[in-house]
Every structure is written in structure tokens, then in C-alpha cells.
Image (cartoon, rainbow, N blue to C red):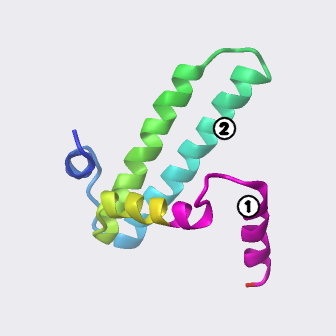
């Protein structure tokens, strides 16, 4: 399944909303909650020695679902979002990650 097919599939599994503000709030809060679940599973796996790596995978999948629904809400193509992210990362780290480039980005943000 490619990303376009995935976006269409996600629509079939999503609640239908009459209120667009409630809809986007649901998708936005949902992705935040799932990201928190990913973090919690990582903490429990490594700090508590309770191996729940399967929970990490499940919650990453749920995070992708909410990402797809946010894209659907705004009429965005998930592929384009990924392509833009790749372009940004290539520009920021043309030779791969370096501490120097990462620090430069922090300086750029502090000047805004």
C-alpha cells in the first residue's frame, strides 16, 4: 500500500464530523496523545525494564493514522509532506548530521 492509498483507507476508518473545528482538534489532540504513548512505551521499555516494544510500533502506526487524517483534513498529499521534509533535511544536513549544523539551526530559531 502506498501513502496515497493509505490516506484514502484512513478516511474509511475515521469518524465523520459535522464541525470542522472539532474534527481538526480531534486529529491534532489524537496525534499528541499517540506521541505521548510512544514516549511512555519507550520509558517503560528502557527505564522500567518492561519490554513493550510492540506498544511502540502500535502507537507509531496510530501516529501515522492521525498524520494522514490531518493531511486529509487540509487536502494535503502525504507524499508531498514527506518530500518537503526530505528537502529540508538535505538542505540542513547536506553531508549528513553534524553537531555544527544542528547548532546553526538552534541559532536560526533563536533569532526569530
- Residue under pointer 1: 102
**Residue 6 got which mark?**
none
> Do the residues bearing badges 2 and 1 touch, measured as CB atoms within 8 Å?
no
Q: Position of residue 49 (x, y in %)?
A: 75, 15
Depth order, front residue of 108/69: 108
- Where disc 2 sits, the SS reads helix
Is 99 contained in the magenta span? yes
Seen at 50% across and 35% down, the residue is 59
Seen at 24% across and 44% down, the residue is 2
Callout 1 crowding tier (Cα within 10 Å): few <14, some 14–19, many ≥20: few
Depth order, front residue of 75/110: 110
Answer with the quarter of the image where residue 18 lies: bottom left
Q: Which is nearer the N-term, disc 2 or disc 1?
A: 2
- Where disc 1 sits, the SS reads helix
- Residue under pointer 2: 39
Is 94 contained in the magenta span? yes
Q: Nearer the viewer, mark 2 or mark 1?
A: 1
View extreme (top): residue = 50
Q: CA distance from mark 2 to mark 1?
A: 23 Å
Q: Position of residue 32 (x, y in %)?
A: 57, 52
Q: Position of residue 9 (x, y in %)?
A: 21, 45
Quadrant including the C terminus: bottom right
Seen at 80% across and 23% down, the residue is 47
Q: Which residues are magenta?
A: 88-111
Amino acid at each position: 500500500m502506498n501513502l496515497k492509498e493509505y490516506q484514502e483507507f484512513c478516511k474509511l476508518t475515521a469518524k465523520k464530523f459535522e464541525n470542522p473545528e472539532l474534527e481538526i482538534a480531534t486529529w491534532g489532540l489524537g496525534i499528541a496523545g499517540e506521541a505521548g504513548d510512544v514516549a511512555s512505551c519507550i520509558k517503560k521499555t528502557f527505564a522500567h525494564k518492561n519490554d513493550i516494544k510492540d506498544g511502540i510500533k502500535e502507537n507509531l502506526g496510530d501516529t501515522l493514522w492521525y498524520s494522514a487524517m490531518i493531511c486529509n483534513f487540509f487536502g494535503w498529499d502525504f507524499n508531498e509532506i514527506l518530500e518537503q521534509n526530505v528537502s529540508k533535511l538535505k538542505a540542513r544536513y547536506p553531508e549528513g548530521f553534524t553537531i555544527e549544523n544542528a547548532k546553526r539551526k538552534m541559532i536560526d530559531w533563536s533569532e526569530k
